[in-house]
Image (tube, rainbow, N blue to C red):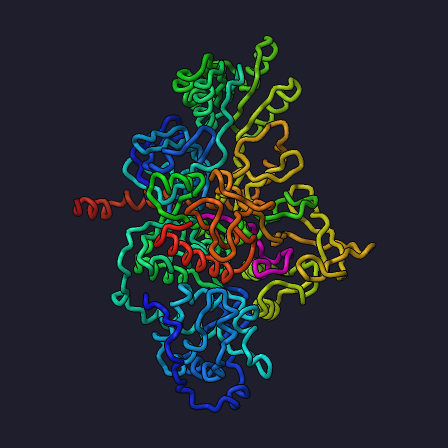
Amino acid sequence: MFKIVHAQFIAPGIKRFVIEAPRIARKQRPGQFVIIRVNETGERIPLTIEKSDPEKGTVNIVVQSIGKTTNLLNSLETGDSILDIVGPLGKPSEIENFGTVVVMGGGVGTAMAYPSASALKKAGNRVITIIGGRNKDLVILEKEMREVSDTVFVTTDDGSYGDKGLVTDRLRQLIDNGTRIDEVLAVGPIPMMKAVADMTRKEHIKTMVSLNPIMIDGTGMCGGCRVLVEGKSEFACVDGPEFDAHRVDFAILVQRNAMYRDAEKRSLEEYKHEVEKNKATAAEPEVACALEGKK
Amino acid sequence: MSTPSTPKEPQKKSSNPIPNKERAKMPRQHMPEALPQIRNKQFTEVNLGYSEELARQEALRCIECAKPSCTKDCPVGVKVKEFVQLIVDGDFMGAAAKIREDNVLPAITGRVCPQEDHCEGACLLCKTSESLGIGYLERFVADYEQKHFDKTKIVRAPSTGKKVAIVGSGPSGLTAAGDLVQKGHQVHVFEALHEIGGVLVYGIPEFRLPKQIIREQVDIMREMGVEFETDVVVGRTVTIDELMEEEGYDAVFIGTGAGLPQFMGIPGEHLNGVYSANEFLTRINLMHAYEFPKYDEPMVDFRGKNVAVIGGGNTALDAIRSSLRLGAGHAFILYRRSEAEMPARIEEVKHAKEEGIEFQVLAAPLEFLDDGKGWLKGARCQKMELGEPDSSGRRRPVPIAGSEYEIPLAVAVMAIGTTANPIIQTTTPGLATTKKGYIQADDTTQKTSRKGVFAGGDIVTGGATVILAMGAGRRAAKAIHDYLTNGEW
């Protein structure tokens, strides 16, 4: 059992958990992730590590409510526990002084990009960060990113904050302005990472992306997370999760991530139904009395 | 429980009243089984186990060889003759204790060990009749022990003050742990997954090895003093060097298993509906996907569909028989050699056939076909014939020109072996590996190139069997004990 020391929503549907996991906290490097299982009947899903505190023995994970497991997770509060957390998994990001690095975070992907941005800055790079979200509320970790970047650009799809448009629009402008870019690191939804890859391929800018295929064990045993990299099967959990964006077959990734869409939909509907039912039961007067009587 | 074996004790006289000559004429007692047409729809165990009467009846068949070849051919050296005699005597707990001197997981080996390749294959009864049902008897004794187990009777060996880390809780790790704790060492087992048992839990299905059996065997080990820690990927969560230098372990045994599943490298392997056997079985066994939506891990819908498993080993049979239980309409094995070369246990092949599995042998897929939406719709296959023996000693499959054919398929499972998992090798400086990336270890001591570090099981040999991994765990435990006692490397 891993205790949640602190849980707080940082945006609508996006929650940050500070979790007691001393072994993971001690070893975590930028670019790595954890796999969690919420309870006995739960599935195993990979999640982003935002940062860790080796002294306090805690890791921060940032979770966006999408399916049943992430919704269930985001219903947990400070003081609750998560049954299993294993990590840190995957190869750490390559951190060197490349020169100028553009770090791009789309939505909750910003949390995964943050520790890399921080490490790249420490390694002496000039860090230009571009983060984006659908609207102002969904732009996360702007303050944290500003602390570790030379420049931060924010974009929103609806223009409610920062520039109206996509993170790639801002990247386009940087390229067109003649900004020297030695490397790009992009973490976010697959269409965003693909768009970045397509753009930088033409410009011959080395680009890394952090992939999020379906995973089970996270140690290379199951092969469920295989991605096609330049025609070769690679496992995101042991060979990645970061790959050279110009070699990744994004179409296969999209296709494979959709494999359980029907089941995922059913799980989420049943979970929501369950939550509603529990709410209704809790609201019934005699139950409420019984609970009060207990107190 | 921790009684040391005394090899020179005088041969006990058997209480078997049947003359030796008569014994070979007695028929082998059949294992009671669930009916094929019922069991192929559920995950409950196929073999139901001997009754006390059946067990004694079968035990009476042992001809009590002076130099038992069954024990010699057992990778962990179970004293078969002795434990069978104790069954004849009706001393089932005594029989269990006798097995435990050499094998800490009898309820597991009694179920999954390929006895025909070891003890039963060596049994002299084979010459005139059928071999003694050693596996069935072992299972009977182990199950009897679990039912009547008295935890208070466990005697813990006096502590040596030495700490041993076991990496991986599969058959080799559990065996090493069990042997070492009985020598008085403090034993801590690290497991990457959330459940103890390694391949026994994620790989072998409930209908062949119920999880409850593993839990009970592990509980006994806990009572013996073995500590278990889940959710630790050694190499990532903590390194071998950190275990030895910072956490004070005097020795480490690496038994992490084979690792990465192999694919054929043919077109279409990334289609939805194509699984590795490891993923397919992990979803079912470890994650209970067959109980979706009670359990959250999903699985594609198998009901009424054509399912093929590519391969001919126990893993392939576990996968195809599982697919039938998930409702597959037509389930078949595609194997490139003939049935004679199949590495699977004979009993599994028999069970699979009874359950309605079709065997398409001497055939292999060349390509998986896309339905246009990224899902598998079929396979283009090729027929084979057998040529000269290859390096494995089995006759090599040779493609027959012009024999290509297509089959409709909704799910394909690749059960064609594994390659070395690199996590520990790449995070442990100075740990020598083979050309194929497995850890180099001595055949008798399981010593690696790093002082204090031992390795065994599939991470050393590549994919093999539960009992061979257990044999390695046993040899390692002996060598670790020697090393911890005399400090010599």
Q: Is residue A20 visible?
A: yes
Q: Quadrant of the N terminus of chain B?
A: bottom left
State the count of labels. Answer: 0
Q: Quadrant of residue B9?
A: bottom left
Question: Which range of residues does the magenta coloring cover?
Answer: B296-317
Q: Residue furthest right?
A: B402
Give the percent coordinates (x, y) of residue B347. Answer: 56, 70
Q: Residue at x 64, y 22 (%)?
A: A201
- Give the quarter of the image for residue A8: top left
Camera-nearest residue between B72 and A241: B72
Rendered position, A161 above or below B111: above
Whole-percent x, y for residue B430 in the image:
49, 40
Going 31% across and 52% down the picture, which residue do you hit?
B186
Closer to us: A87 or B121: B121
Q: What residue lies at 48% left-to-right and 48% top-to-bottom?
A: B448
From this view, report whether residue B351 is shown above or below residue B168: below
Using residue A197 as the reference point, say whether residue A59 is left or right of it: left
* Position above or below: B330 against A132: below
Name the residue nearer the viewer: A28 or B375: A28
Q: Residue furthest top?
A: A177
